[in-house]
Image (spheres, rainbow, N blue to C red):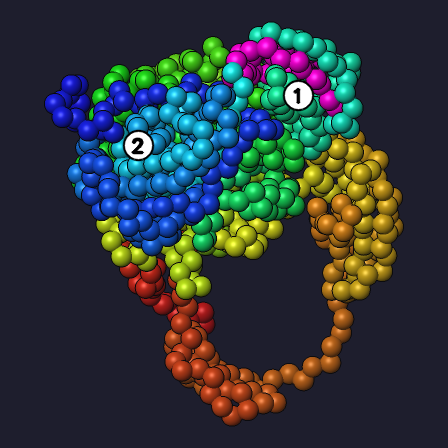
Amino acid sequence: MKYEKGRKNMRKYEDINFISQNREPQRSYYIPEKGCILLNGEWNFKFFEYDFEEEYTDKNWDKILVPSCWELCGYENPNYANVAYPHPVNPPYVPTKNPMGIYERNFVIADDDRETYIVFEGVSSCLELYINGEYVGFSQGSHLQAEFNISKFVKKGTNSVLVKVRKWCVGSYLEDQDFFRFHGIFRDVYLLSRPKGHIKDIKIVTEENCIKIDFDGTARIDLYNAEKQKIAEIDANKTAEIEVDAPVLWNAEKPYLYELVFTYKDEIIKQKVGFVEYEISEKQEFLVNGVPVKIKGVNHHDTHPENGWVMSDEDILQDLYLMKNLNINAIRTSHYPPTPKFLEMCDEIGFYVMLETDLEEHGFENRYAGGTGYDCLENPEWPCSNPEWKDVFLDRIMRAYHRDKNHASIFSWSIGNESGHGENSYEMLKWLRKEDSHRLLHSEDASRMADFSERYDNITSGYAERVDIHSRMYTSIDEIKDKLENPEFKKPYFLCEYSHAMGNGPGDVCDYWETLYGYPNFIGGCIWEWADHTVIVDGVPKYGGDFEGEMTYDGNFCCDGMVFHNRKLKAGSLEIKKAYQGMECELSGGELIVENRYDFTNLNEFKFKYEIKLDGEIIEAKIDVLDIAPHEKKVVKITLPDKCQLGAYINCFLYDHDLCVAQCQIELDIEKNKPIFENTAANVTENNNFIIFCGEGFEYTFSKKLGTFVSIKRNGEEQLSAPIKISAWRAPTDNERNIKQKWGWYNIWEGENLNRQFEFVYDSS
C-alpha cells in the first residue's frame, strides 16, 4: 500500500496532497444579516455511473432537490455499512467506476461591485466547482464547510454554477463511519454578497468577566444581554476586550447567552456568547464554572428516514427538545461536525457538546481477509501512522475547530473515532492543545492505546498524557471500578459509547449511573446512539441488506437508537430518562430523603409530589415545592403505615409544569398480614408412575419417571401438545450476535446449542 507521489496522469481526487484548491481558509461560522442568497431548491442534475472528466454538453437535465442524498432521489440504492469500506482498501485509489453527479443552476447577481462567495456546508465526497463555465476550485471533507470567493468569475445579472460531485475520493478513506453511505449536496448552499474589506474570521473567548475578541477587519461592536439590552459599544480594529459586570454564566441547565453585533459598512454579523469555563479538578471531576457535572450524554448522527443525512431545522429541534425531555444534557456529534445550526441550537437550548471531526478509518482493521485488528502502531498502512497523510488529518481538525470555536456548548474536541492512533493523530492533538486552552481534548483511540500499554510492557506508554479525558467504549462496570480504584489512575473516566441501544437494549443504565455517582472521577458517558437509521420504502423501514447492489452491509446494526426512526420512544428511552433524572429518593429510618442531582437548578423550580400506596390504594398524596439546592439533600416529613396485606410503596414525582421529569418508587419494609382465603384443596391420587391433582374444572398429571407434567386438562380439554420440557433457551437479543461470533454458538438462533439438555430424576425415598 505504499503511496507513490507524482504518479503520471494521477486523478486529482486520488492525490493525498490535493485536499483543496482555491478554497477559502476556514473561518468561524456566521451568516451576515444581509446579502445571503440561499441556493437550496431545484437544480438541474445528471448522474453518471462512471466518472466522466470531459465537459458535459447534453442539456437534457434531470431535476433534483438540494440539499438531498442522491440515493434517495432515484440514483443508486442506499447502502448501510459499519466497519467495512464499500470499496476495496487500496489507498489512495478508489474504484475506476466512480459514480458522479453533476449539479447545475442559475443565480442572479444584483451588484458586481461587492465580494461574492459561495458556501457549501456539506458535500459527499468531494466537489469540483465551475462558475459560468470556468473552473473555480475543489474541496473534500464531506461534513466540513467549503467556501469559495467567486467575485472574479461572476457578472451582474444571470450567472450559472455547476458542481461535479464524485461518490468517492481519497478522503473517503477517512469517512468510514457507522451509517448509511449517502452522497451528493446534502447541506445548505448559499451565496454571500459582502462589502469590500469585510470581516473574515472572528474568535471569541470569555475569561472571568471579560470577552476577548480577535477578528480580521474593523467594526463597531455592540454587546447585548439576553434581555436584548445594549450593555456595551466600542469601535475596534482586529482586537477588542469588553468587560461585563457580574456576568450571568452559561451552563446546559440555564443557557444564558449574550450577543455581539459586528457592524462594518452595511454588513451586520451576530455572534452569541456564553460565559463558561470547562476544566478538570484535582479530584479529576469535570467542572463547569467550578461546579462538578456529570455528562448525561447520547451520540447523535444526522439521520432521517426519508431524507437520509438531510435534517431540517424542525427535525433538529425535535431531536433536541426530545433529548431535554429525556434528561439528556450532553451530545457527542458522532462522528463528524453537524450542520452549524445544530450547534447554535445547542447553545440556545442548553447541551454540553463533544465536537468530533469528520474522521474514521475503522475498515483498516479488516483490510485483509480474516481481519488484522488495531495494528496501527507505526504501521504506514494506516493513514493515522503514515506521514503522507499528516496534512489531511490536520486539515480536518483545523476546519472543524475554526468553524465551531465560538460555541459556548462545546466542552471538548474529539479528533475522530475508531481510527487507530498514530503520529498524525498526535499532531492533531498537539495543534489543538496550542490553539485552544479552554476546552478538553478527547481521543478514545489514544485511551485505548494507553490501556493497551498497561497490559503489554508499556509499548504505548505516554498515550494517556496526550488527552484530558480517559475514554473507552462498552466497558463493564467491574472493569471501570478496577480502573477508578487504582491509585495510579489520574484521569477523569468517560464512556464515549456505552449501553448499545439495539433491539430491547439498552440495559444496566441505572447500574452504570449508580456507579457514576459513587466516583467523582467517573464523569459520565454517551449512549450509543440517539435514533435508529432506516430508509422508508413504501412505508416500510429498511436497513442494511434490503437494497439491491449492497456488496457489503451490516444488517440491522443501524437500528440501535434509544428512539425509533420516527422518534417514538422505546422502553429503553424511559430507562435512560430514569437514570439521567435530576432527583433521587431514599427511605432511611422512616424518613424520606430527597436528593437534588441537578448541577445548577434548585428543586424549588419544580413541583414535587409524593403518594403512599397501600395494597393498591392511595392512602395519602401531597404536592409541594421543595427548596433543595443542587447536589444537596433534604428530609421530607411523612407518616408511614405500619402494616399491609399485599404491599406498600412511596411513589415520588417531579414535575416541570405538566411534564414528569423524575420519578422514584420505594417499597416499604413493613409487616404483611396476608389475607385469609377459603380454598378447597385439590384431590390428590398417586400410583407407581403418576401423581394426579384434580379439582373443579382441572386435572394435572405429573410423571414421577420424567419429573414433569405430562397432562394438563381444563374442563376436560387437554392443554398440552407434549409433556412439559425444561429449557434454558430464550430468543437471543440483537446485541448477542457478537457473542455468537465470539464463542461459536453456531445455531444460537435456533436454540440448538443452548437447548441440549439431559434430565435426571432422583428417587428421594
Determine whether, in the image, residue 202 is placed left or right of residue 77: right
Mark drawn on residue 133 = 2
Between 53 and 126, the one lying in front of the other is: 53
Quarter that holds the C terminus: bottom left
Q: Main secondary structure of the magenta part?
A: strand
Identify whether 473 is placed above or below 209. below
Determine whether, in the image, residue 723 is placed left or right of residue 247: left
* Front tag of 1 and 2: 2
Identify whether 675 is placed above or below 355. below
Amino acid on which the number 2 mark rests in the picture: Gly
Q: Is residue 202 magenta?
A: yes
Of callouts 1 and 2, which one flags the residue occurring earlier in the amino acid sequence?
Answer: 2
Which segment did they paint magenta? 197-225
Residue name at image x 72 percent, y 40 percent: 583
- Residue at disc 1, secondary structure: strand
Can residue 335 be seen from the camera position used here? no
User: Circle 1 is placed at which residue position?
Assistant: 261
Determine whether, in the image, residue 322 is placed left or right of residue 256: left
Q: Is residue 551 magenta?
A: no
